[in-house]
Amino acid sequence: MWKQRLELFRGVVPEETLREGVQAHKDHRVKCVALCKDDLVGFVELDTAWNVAKTQVAIYPGGRIAGTCTCGSPEKICPHMIATVLGTSKLSPPNHPRRNALVAVRRAGKREVVVSAIAVDEHGHGTWSAQTMGRHRPGTSIHLVEIYSLSEPANECSCSEYQFDQLGTCRHVEGVLYRLDSKALPARSVVYVDWAGGEPILRISWSASHAGAPPAAIAGLFDDERYAVAAPQDVVEAVEASGDVAIGLAVRQLLDREIALHARARRGNRVVREMRGLRTTPTFHGSLRPFQEEGVEFLVRHGSAVLADEMGLGKTVQAIAAADWMMTLGEVSRVLVICPASIKVPASSRWCSAS
């Protein structure tokens, strides 16, 4: 089937580009293809660091093809666009992005990952090494995989794919699980992050020794479906105190993220109170409209943010006022302004001279 789709490009693109697109398709570098209105949207892997190019391809009546790709190629039709069209067998059903991502990850783990046991028990629980192999990967990193459960997404991997994809798994974990018996119960109970509902929630996987009689101090933190009913901080503190249950790396990352968000919120509330107490700074001589004052307060509250007002609403003066406030409040000591040469800032401005 893909060879028939290849005929769309013959005589339209150079043979070298055509060969590169075919090779990307054969190497299974097309990770997902979805239909967006009438266009094909694809994600094609670029290198060993899980970097991908996003393509959008339109096929018009008569066979004319046009599209875009984030790879930066000067060609009107790049190899990644060709691979996307050839990879329409991976076309994603609508409204199931998570399921499609899991299918792609499991397929990659089955086909592309080589694993080796480091310290495991008779069921395969323990530490493994995993490495992605392939002709388009001349040298790849070795990742450590921790297997707690063979049936639930309670395992861990040291790769960035596991950390950022929010699937609870990755190709390296799936590569190990593919080679193991999925019927064995966990050797140790473990608390992990379940992303199945779209929002992170803590869940526990009971081991064989805890399946019938879980520790009372821990069992009360979870409902009948093993989802946490207490705050993540309380769950982690109770589990650490018991010493009988493992805590997944993703749980600690989630907890650290919540702590950072709370700290940012406290800092934002503090600086806004100081702003309202001072009302103005001695170095800002402009006048702001009420909605611009809200924009300045938003920038100062968050510390790092993007102001995306529509054109003509005064984003520049809001940015200047926010920078002036942050210097007044001691939140920053230097400000770097990158702007068109047509935008002038008075040389007397203290934060301009410090940039």
Image (tube, rainbow, N blue to C red):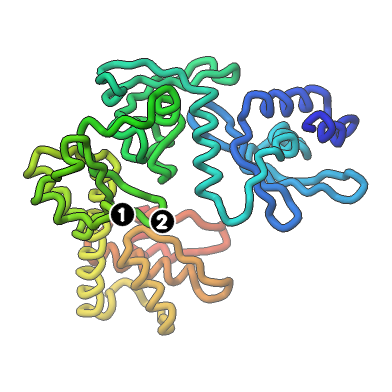
- SS for callout 2: loop
Amino acid type, label 2? Gly
Residue extending furthest toward the left: 241
Residue extending furthest toward the bottom: 290
Give me the residue at 12% from left, 38% from top: 244
Q: Which residue is mark 2?
A: 197
Where is residue 287? Give x, y as percent. 41, 81
Q: Is residue 320 above or below residue 24?
A: below
Where is residue 205? Give x, y as percent. 26, 42
Q: Residues within 10 Å of mark 1 (few under 14, many from 20)?
A: some
Residue 80 lies left or right of residue 11; in this view the side is left
- Camera-side residue: 214 or 305? 214
Residue 200 lies left or right of residue 208; in this view the side is right
- The quarter of the picture where residue 293 lies is bottom left
Q: Is residue 272 above or below residue 96?
A: below
- Camera-side residue: 222 or 236? 222
- The quarter of the picture where residue 37 lies is bottom right
Give me the residue at 30% from left, 68% from top: 325
Where is residue 6? Give x, y as percent. 82, 31
Give me the residue at 50% from left, 48% from top: 98
Give me the residue at 26% from left, 80% from top: 279
- The quarter of the picture where residue 130 lies is top left
Amino acid type, label 1? Ile
**Is residue 333 visible in the rendered structure shown here?**
no
Q: Are marks 1 and 2 in contact (CB under 8 Å)?
A: yes
Q: Which residue is mark 1?
A: 201
Q: In which quadrant will I find the N terminus?
A: top right
- Camera-side residue: 72 or 1? 1
- Marking on residue 285: none
Spatial separation of the CA atoms under disc 1 and disc 2: 8 Å
- SS for callout 1: strand
Residue extending furthest toward the front: 212
